[in-house]
Amino acid sequence: MTPCGTDTAPRKPRPYHRRPSPRTGGVVPGPWRPRPRCWPLVAALALALSWLSPVSAGPQDPLLAVAPRWGWRNVSCPVCRALFGALDVALQLEPTVSRVGRLASRLCQDLRLARAEVCREAVQLFQRDVVSAWARSVLRPAEACGLLLGPRCGHWDILGDWNVSLPDTPKPPVRPPEPPAPGAPSARILFLTDLHWDRLYAPGSAAACPDPLCCRGAARPGAPGAGFWGEYGKCDLPLRTIELLLEQLPAAAPLAAVYWTGDIPAHDVWQQSRRDQLRALSTVTAALRRRLGSVPVFPAVGNHEATPVNAFPPPYVRGNQSAAWLYDAMAREWQQWLSPDALRTLRAGGFYTAQVWPGLRLVSLNMNFCSQANFWLLINATDPAGQLQWLVGVLAAAERAGDKVHIIGHIPPGHCLRSWSWNYYRIVSRFEGTIAGQFFGHTHVDEFEMFYDEETLTRPVSIAFIAPSVTTYINLNPGYRVYVVDGSYPGSSHAVLDHETFILNLTEANTPGAVPRWQRLYRARETYGLPSAFPADWDRLLRRFQDDERLFQRFWFLLHKGHPPRAPCGAGCKAALLCALRSGRSDDPGLCRPLRPTLPFARIQQLWRQRRLC
């Protein structure tokens, strides 16, 4: 059977089945599979290629001005249906992968998602994995435009609801967090995310270009180009800027640990090879080992580590298309930081648990198993690799031992597929007395996501901190975060007590003759007037943002690491952003109902999709 069969047999009402996996407790695909027609594969390739087309927004909407507006969002529903109706007829004449690739490349060019060369290279890179994943999925042709454009253009439910099992043991009584006693030790944890090293970054090159990544190629005589240390625009960073960060880390207080949540390679996603990705992994890991010495480092897997980007097949995908090439390399590079048990689950699924210090455990999640951009999840998205059920076990063991847990990952939970996100929210609620901190990246900006009790959605139970990126992509200063947490002593809460954000001001650093200097941008408690940094404090801050416009605009400035869009964030932008800050789980309009200003949830979701950078 070719991957693009033309079988038109009637579909069953629910043409897939879930059955427990004996290895992970998750699920594996059911035994019956239709032979999918080919044009949904073109849709899949086009969906993947839609990540290649950043378009600047107008000044009327500053929330969009800092982000790409991906090509498919500019296609109307009737146009989408007409395109794929025509492709359906054409593909039945030659149902092969090469035919899919040629049509996807043509579609990419016709829709102006990218330059012709970029379209061809991207299709060549993506087509084999995307076609393989879609050939094993059960998405019907009529559902493709609903997937690409949203529910206004069609319904698809392949990613249906599912639940993990929580312990039968009752949840311990909730004890409100309390500040540590005066003089209690604290610890500083360096948090690095989204480094995006570009080995082809070239000072003087064009900072504006039609491709997804600029600041590469020859310098342009007589025209201002990319700066030596980095540039505002669609640009990533040279290695020297990352090394400067590590050289200039504050020496006044030593670091107790480093949390590093991925996205190492650059955004040249249309032309990456496995060799390129492994070179980025080894080069940046070596720089951290060299500069940080004996400080323990706890990494997490980002969505850009794979090639094609976002392609993280669950463990039941074997052979050359599995993720073993990446996880095995990570285990080799990180073996001096992680225990044999941690390396074992890292090799199996890209996640692990480890001890930070006595009384504090860390869980590093592979958040690619919750990502809508991971096309491998179209086969089966129910708790991939059994990761969430494994997390429940780790947290239950920590609860019995009286330990606290920090959770790190790349993609924030509010950005995840709905069922994954809601299950994670349940887990956080059940183990609120054990989870002492959540730390994520991915968005490139400085924000957070609140978690509330499931009964009323009003009592804050946890907060997921989302730290800014090291890279400048798009139009940002480079940045990093240091968390101050309750230290290692009997009875410690290990909770976040404060955090500091540092930036490299590119306007100053790229000035001829200037000495580049990483500098503190702000301290959270000092800047926002927080008595402490517990979830209730951040909830009160969020409510203050509604009425204190000056304070909110200060947050908007810091959100972008001191380099915001020119226009302030207006009413629609503010409504969408406040809703995002209150949404530790995805697709829940109930979380945003108490907020002002009000905005229809469908419009809020549209703004969210348009502002996401990665």
Image (spheres, rainbow, N blue to C red):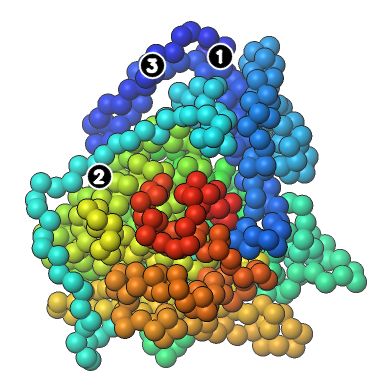
Residue on which disc 1 sits: 5
Question: Mark 3 or 2, which is nearer the eye?
Answer: 3
149 lies above or below 516: above
Secondary element at tag 3: loop
Residue on which disc 3 sits: 13
Distance from the alpha carbon under mark 3 to that under mark 2: 29 Å
Q: Tell me which corner region of the image, top left, top right, bottom left or bottom right, holds residue 330.
A: bottom left
Please give left or right for residue 191 compared with residue 6 in the image: left
Question: Mark 1 or 3, which is nearer the eye?
Answer: 3
Q: Amino acid at mark 1?
A: Gly
Q: Nearer the viewer, residue 407 or 129?
A: 407
Q: Nearer the viewer, residue 589 or 92?
A: 589
Distance from the alpha carbon under mark 1 to that under mark 3: 20 Å
- Residue at image position (77%, 52%) is 210
Distance from the alpha carbon under mark 1 to that under mark 2: 36 Å
Q: Amino acid at mark 2?
A: Gln
Camera sees residue 471? no
Crowdedness near tag 2: few (<14), some (14–19) or many (≥20) residues, C-alpha within 10 Å: many
Residue on which disc 2 sits: 389
Q: Mark 1 vs mark 2: which is more N-terminal?
A: 1
Q: Mark 3 vs mark 2: which is more N-terminal?
A: 3
Q: Position of residue 450 (x, y in %)?
A: 35, 62
Q: Residue furthest right?
A: 222
Please give left or right for residue 537 compared with residue 155 in the image: left
Camera sees residue 529? yes
Q: Amino acid at mark 3?
A: Pro
Q: Tell me which corner region of the image, top left, top right, bottom left or bottom right, holds residue 529.
A: bottom left
- Residue at image position (10%, 46%) is 168
336 lies above or below 327: below
- Residue at image position (58%, 66%) is 570
Crowdedness near tag 1: few (<14), some (14–19) or many (≥20) residues, C-alpha within 10 Å: some
Q: Position of residue 320 (x, y in %)?
A: 49, 34
